């Protein structure tokens, strides 16, 4: 014969189940409709084609987010975490990515004219065909970054002193 669980044991089991449910849920999910602001959590959000001119996304969580064909001119993404984010064909002239973590980010064909990447981590990023003319790459980590066909005319190189020649494509001359 089965014996029914007493109230103290039953409530203990229910409390344990509730705690396990909360722990298993993991970190809070991104709210992709949240307004652009510093430290916003747009992880895995699709912001394709959005106009985000001049927004302040400093310290934002942008991991695996997509900004394909988005307009980010003069946007501030200082110290943002954009690991594996996609900025394919984005328009971001004058955007500030200083100190941002952009490992494996994809900037293929993006307009980054005059953008600042001071101390940004761009390891293994893809910048194929991107316009980095007059961009500031002072202190940027570019190990493994694909710069094929990227326009680096007039860009300030990682050493902070060398300015790339006007005909620099794919490498800083």
Image (tube, helix red, strand yellow):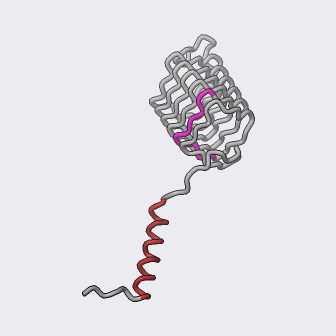
Name the residue: 65% across, 49% down.
39
Instruction: Assign the C terminus to one quadrant of the image.
Output: top right
* Viewer-nearest residue: 11 or 125: 11
Q: Which residues are magenta?
A: 60-69
Residue 138 falls within the magenta-colored stretch: no
In the image, residue 65 lies at what x, y percent?
56, 39
- Quadrant for residue 62, please give it: top right
In the displayed structure, would residue 7 be above or below residue 22? below
- Quadrant for residue 132, please give it: top right
Instruction: Assign the N terminus to one quadrant of the image.
Output: bottom left
In the image, residue 80 lies at what x, y percent?
61, 43
Name the outermost residue toward the left.
1
Name the outermost residue toward the top.
167
In the image, residue 104 lies at what x, y percent?
48, 35
In the image, residue 86 lies at what x, y percent?
54, 33
Image-based side of 69 in relation to 23, left or right? right
Q: Main secondary structure of the magenta part?
A: loop
Image-based side of 70 in relation to 1, left or right? right
* Viewer-nearest residue: 10 or 158: 10
Count of numbered labels shown in the rendering: 0
Name the residue: 58% across, 30% down.
87
Name the outermost residue toward the front.
1
Residue 61 falls within the magenta-colored stretch: yes
């Amino acid at each position: 014969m089965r014996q029914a669980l007493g109230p103290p044991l039953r409530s203990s089991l229910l409390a344990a189940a509730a705690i396990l449910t909360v722990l298993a849920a993991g970190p809070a999910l991104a709210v992709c409709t949240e307004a652009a602001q510093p430290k916003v959590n747009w992880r895995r959000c699709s912001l394709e084609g959005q106009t985000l001119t001049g927004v302040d996304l400093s310290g934002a969580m942008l991991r695996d987010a997509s900004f394909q064909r988005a307009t980010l001119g003069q946007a501030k993404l200082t110290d943002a975490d954009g690991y594996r984010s996609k900025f394919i064909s984005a328009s971001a002239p004058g955007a500030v990515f200083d100190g941002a973590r952009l490992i494996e980010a994809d900037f293929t064909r993006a307009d980054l004219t005059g953008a600042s990447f001071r101390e940004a981590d761009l390891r293994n990023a893809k910048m194929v065909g991107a316009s980095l003319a007059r961009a500031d790459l002072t202190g940027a980590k570019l190990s493994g970054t694909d710069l094929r066909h990227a326009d680096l005319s007039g860009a300030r190189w990682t050493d902070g002193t060398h300015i790339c020649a006007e005909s620099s494509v794919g490498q800083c001359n």
